Amino acid sequence: VEAAIAQAEAEVVFNAAAYNKVDVAESEPQAAYAANALAVRNLAIACRQNDARLVHFSTDYVFDGMLGRAYRETDAVRPLSAYGVSKLAGEYYAQAYCESALILRTSGVFGPQGMKTVNGNGIQRTVRVEAAGWAMRVGGGSVAS
């Protein structure tokens, strides 16, 4: 990774890669941590070595979903799942190794590429959950359908 960043003479590196199987992460926490935390650490080190800014995509799962209002970046984090813990660790690594790291917390990622996957994109999953009458986990909280 470090060689690729150096060869590209990258000034900014966007990390949108992630272990994003939120529910499966509970039974595979090591895999989630490897992709969402340790890989970010390695990328952040490579960015630091090459003076590149890291832009890292994280998640609102770093919060517990109980605040009762929209979260701000200054609100206390309290992940309730292995996925949330792994993503928060990635944030910490990015900030620890890259002085100018930018963390973007997203929720419900969607887009046409996701439609080509087995599970679909965030919007398709929401529609499927609603149609089945299941409870849906949102931002660390739980919302009954």
Image (cartoon, rainbow, N blue to C red):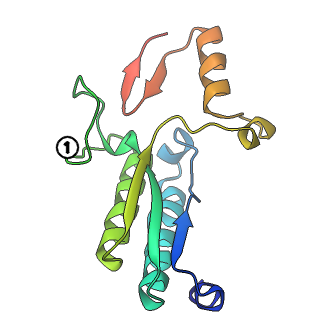
10 Å neighbourhood of mark 1: few (<14), some, or many (≥20)?
few
The residue lying toward the viewer, choosing from 87 and 29, is 87
The residue lying toward the viewer, choosing from 50 and 88, is 50
Q: Looking at the image, is 67 positioned above or below residue 134? A: below
Residue depicted at 38% across the width and 58% down the height: 103
The residue lying toward the viewer, choosing from 86 and 31, is 86
Which quadrant is home to the N terminus?
bottom right
Q: Looking at the image, is 96 positioned above or below residue 105? A: below
Q: Amino acid at mark 1?
A: Asp
Q: Secondary structure at mark 1?
A: loop
Q: Looking at the image, is 41 positioned above or below residue 34? A: below
Image x and y of residue 89, in percent: 35, 61
Image x and y of residue 101, in percent: 37, 69
Residue depicted at 36% across the width and 33% down the height: 140
Return the residue at label 1: 75
Q: How many marks?
A: 1
Image x and y of residue 20, in percent: 56, 48
Residue depicted at 24% across the width and 46% down the height: 77
Image x and y of residue 60, in percent: 38, 41
Residue 88 lies left or right of residue 125; in this view the side is left
The residue lying toward the viewer, choosing from 5 and 143, is 5
